[in-house]
Amino acid sequence: MFEKLLVANRGEIAVRVMAACEELGIETVAIYSDADRNSGHVDYADEAYNVGPAPASESYLDQETIVETAVDAGADAIHPGYGFLAENAEFAARIEETDGLTWVGPPSEAMESLGEKTNARQIMQEAEVPVVPGTVEPVDSAEEVRDIGTEYGYPVAIKAEGGGGGRGMQIVAGPDEVDDALETARREGEAYFDNPSVYVEKYLEAPKHIEVQILADHHDTVLHLGERDCSLQRRHQKVIEEAPSPMLDAELRERIGNAARRGVREAGYTNAGTVEFLVEDGEFYFMEVNTRIQVEHTVTEEVTGIDIVREQIRVAAGEPLPYTQEDIEFAGHSMEFRINAENPGQGFSPTPGKLVTYDPPGSIGVRIDDAIAQGKTIAGDYDSMVAKLIVTAADRQRCIERAKRALRHFDVDGVHTTIPFHRLMLTDEAFLAGEHTTKYLDESITEADLADAVERWAGDVELVSGDRSPTRDIAVEVDDRRYTVTIEEGLSVDGEGSDTGDGASAGGVEGALVAEMQGTVITVPVEPGETVEAGDVVCVLEAMKMENDILAQTSGTVSEVQVTEGQSVDMGDVLVVLE
Ligand code: ADP
């Protein structure tokens, strides 16, 4: 077994991995950026090293520095968590090639072959796993796209070869839209994934998103741990996940689970992974493999009793999985609610700020995965996650009752959160019946419903800006001599917009709408000279798999657009100026 493991990540998942290490008797090493000096994962680790400035590209994505840090710290393994470098085959290969270091994840070769979506589709077909109808080769011309449209019927989806999270996906309703969509998909693929190559598949009208958790060791055991239903999505991003799926019967569960096992076996896969499917009219279709631990692995842990992160580490150390497929038993029902610092009433725009109150619920069936505490600040540098609330009970109905109780007692003040959204969903008939598809949220829940929910359940929230850089004195003793050391306690958070929660007030320039977090520009739906109304979307920013609308706060005329699609922006950068 390993002696010391470096976690190349931050926040709750870094703490989750370290918790597994602690139970295995492995020492932990954290890395952090300038913005994270006082983050929960740094406090949790046995040792911590600064790997660079706040922008992820200069810290959490700096492969060379991370590997050097691991070597210098004497670590013998690296766990990437999710996001950042977790699905980067080049990073995995670099670790595989470094003497004394082990990558806690699948072989880099399997990551590479499954990361290319058409290649993954071919592998699945060889393993007799049904794939979403479409091409298994990249597509070059609009003509080929139209051929698919004619063959399978519109709509079709043009997807980036390197894509994921709904990014780089264009939905085409008819032949006239093909040219533009093809160009956009290519451009997004290039901007996000450095790969302009695209392919085409049928766009299913009302599918369920069902994914299967896989665990595979180096001793020929490939297990499935059942499915998760992640059909509740906002713009193709998961918001509530559950296990088991309310819409799968035992027979389909068995078939889909075994298909997932066949597929990853064909790819030479080991460690944990997720095979994602779309299910429609009782048929399932492979979509993609996520070659990492996922945010929502927790609900599977709850219904199987298996510590997936622990098994990831054991598998990487060469140990056999201590189960056969027959040993895997499912009990109860579990749901995960992502508690993010966002305002659901304003297009889920992030509201960084200080957690003046942070008092999560407890008691039976409630699990909180977080890396935060009352008084700390949610900065705008990374994703907006505050915590994951995981609720488990004997069956779905009781899980829902318990989740209502837990959310009612989840007290947060200082920032807006997604709690009112979750409470709304727990009163929603389609969700309660388990009938929702991936389209449901976008089509059926209105902005007004969301604004009402925020008013009802978070009407008295007072937004508080994060601390800039408060300091604190502590006493240390070295060789019996006492010293006082002044340390920086908080971290800089740009208070801009925190008082209104809209990310809109300007850094210096009047009428300027600025980026509240580091991210990538997805679209700028306005042009100079155009008039906008208060509440209109003027820019969509993507950060850590979340899409964030930047809204005009007042009506006015667009005088400047300072960014273009695909461009990376830092917190505080001006996006659009209104007059
Ligand atoms: P991920 O978010 O896991 O990286 P994708 O980007 O491939 O995966 O897909 C995200 C979501 O987009 C899916 O869960 C589903 O809601 C939607 N989607 C993707 N492909 C299709 C399709 N062919 N038909 C209908 N919906 C799709």
Image: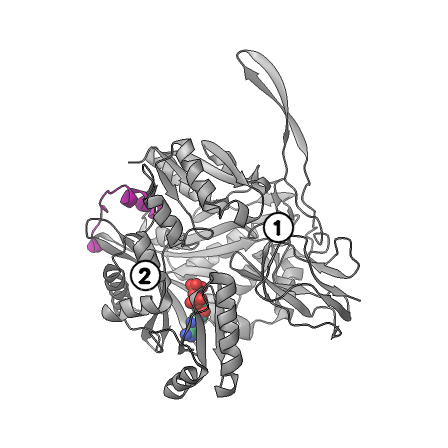
Residue 439, disc: none
Report the residue marked by disc 2.
113
Instruction: Measuring from the top left, give residue 510's x and y in whole percent.
Output: 80, 59
Residue 101, located in which quarter of the rendered image? Answer: top left
Query: In the rendered view, does 293 fall on the left or right side of 485?
Result: left
- Which of the two discs, 1 and 2, labels the residue nearer the N terminus? 2
Residue at horizontal 28%, vertical 41%? Answer: 317
Residue at disc 1, secondary structure: loop
Q: Are marks 1 and 2 in contact (CB under 8 Å)?
A: no
Name the quadrant of the N terminus.
top left
Tally the marks.
2
Seen from the viewer's position, the closer of residues 197 and 263 is: 197
- Is residue 227 visible from the viewing direction of this image? no
Residue at horizontal 36%, vertical 46%? Answer: 309
Residue at disc 2, secondary structure: helix
Quarter of image, ligand 1: bottom left
Per the rendered image, the range of residues in magenta is 307-326
